[in-house]
């Protein structure tokens, strides 16, 4: 079940480097795309950065709305993740074509992608030069959600939940999934 996550902990949804699904909405349209280049930037207020290419429908909708979501997809969604990162939303309804289900977000118009394990609702912090030069968007996280079945003791724990593990894009359709949790000895924790 999707449950709220304290905003000051929102960075934990991205700090392990997962591929994300970026959703956008404006002008009566929505879109979804895959993005491997997304990362947390700050704790309070929480901020993220994501690369959204200028030529994409997602970029057009984000430019128009100033909002997007970052959703952390799972191993079970791998084929859909690769597919929505490979075709344009200008010509296809990627939601319908690949069977992705949208759910309403709480603070932004861009939808959440059902079946993911983490969701960040984001409002763009205008940096026109950075956006134009580098396709880099910096945003404040205004709401965060996590799948409670894989969130234990304040972080992801995918033990026994192989299909819920997050995916990480290497290149050319090759991915790996999140692995075993291990702790450094010097942390003083078990």
Image: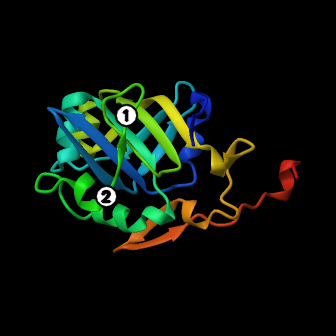
Task: Report whether 126 appears left or right of 176.
Answer: left
Report the residue at 45% width, 71% height from top.
175
Report the residue at 75% width, 43% height from top.
153
Res 165 visible = no
Question: Residue 99 — which label?
Answer: 2
How crowded pointer 2 is (Cα within 10 Å; few <14, some 14-19, many 20+) is rated as few
Residue situated in front as seen by the camera: 86 or 151: 151
The mark total stands at 2
Report the residue at 62% width, 35% height from top.
9
Residue 46 sits above or below residue 118 on the image: above
Question: Residue 35 — which label?
Answer: none
- Residue 49 percent across, percent down from the top left: 41, 41
Question: Which of the 4 image quarters holds residue 99?
Answer: bottom left
Task: Report whether 56 appears left or right of 35.
Answer: left
Secondary structure type for disc 2: loop
Residue situated in front as seen by the camera: 98 or 143: 98
Q: Residue furthest left?
A: 91
Residue 183 sits above or below residue 146 on the image: below
Report the residue at 20% width, 62% height from top.
87
**What's the CA distance linking mark 1 and mark 2?**
16 Å
- Residue 1 percent across, percent down from the top left: 57, 43
- Residue 17 percent across, percent down from the top left: 52, 55
Task: Report whether 66 appears left or right of 20.
Answer: left
Q: Which residue is mark 1?
A: 104
Question: Which of the 4 image quarters holds residue 7?
Answer: top right
């Amino acid at each position: 079940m999707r449950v709220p996550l304290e905003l000051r902990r929102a960075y934990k949804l991205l700090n392990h480097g997962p591929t994300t699904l970026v959703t956008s909405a404006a002008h009566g349209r929505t879109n979804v795309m895959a993005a491997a280049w997304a990362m947390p930037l700050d704790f309070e207020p929480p901020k993220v950065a994501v690369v959204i290419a200028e030529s994409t429908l997602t970029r057009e909708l984000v430019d128009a709305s100033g909002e997007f979501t970052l959703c952390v997809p799972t191993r079970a969604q791998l084929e859909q993740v690769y597919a929505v990162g490979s075709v344009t939303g200008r010509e296809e309804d990627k939601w319908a074509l690949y069977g992705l289900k949208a759910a309403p977000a709480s603070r932004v118009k861009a939808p959440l992608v059902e079946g993911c394990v983490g969701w960040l609702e984001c409002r763009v912090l205008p940096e026109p030069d950075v956006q134009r030069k580098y396709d880099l968007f910096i945003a404040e996280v205004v709401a965060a959600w996590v799948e409670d079945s894989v969130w234990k003791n304040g972080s992801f724990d995918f033990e026994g939940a192989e299909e819920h593990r997050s995916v990480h894009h290497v290149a050319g359709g090759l991915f790996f999934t999140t692995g075993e949790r291990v702790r450094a000895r010097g942390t003083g924790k078990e």
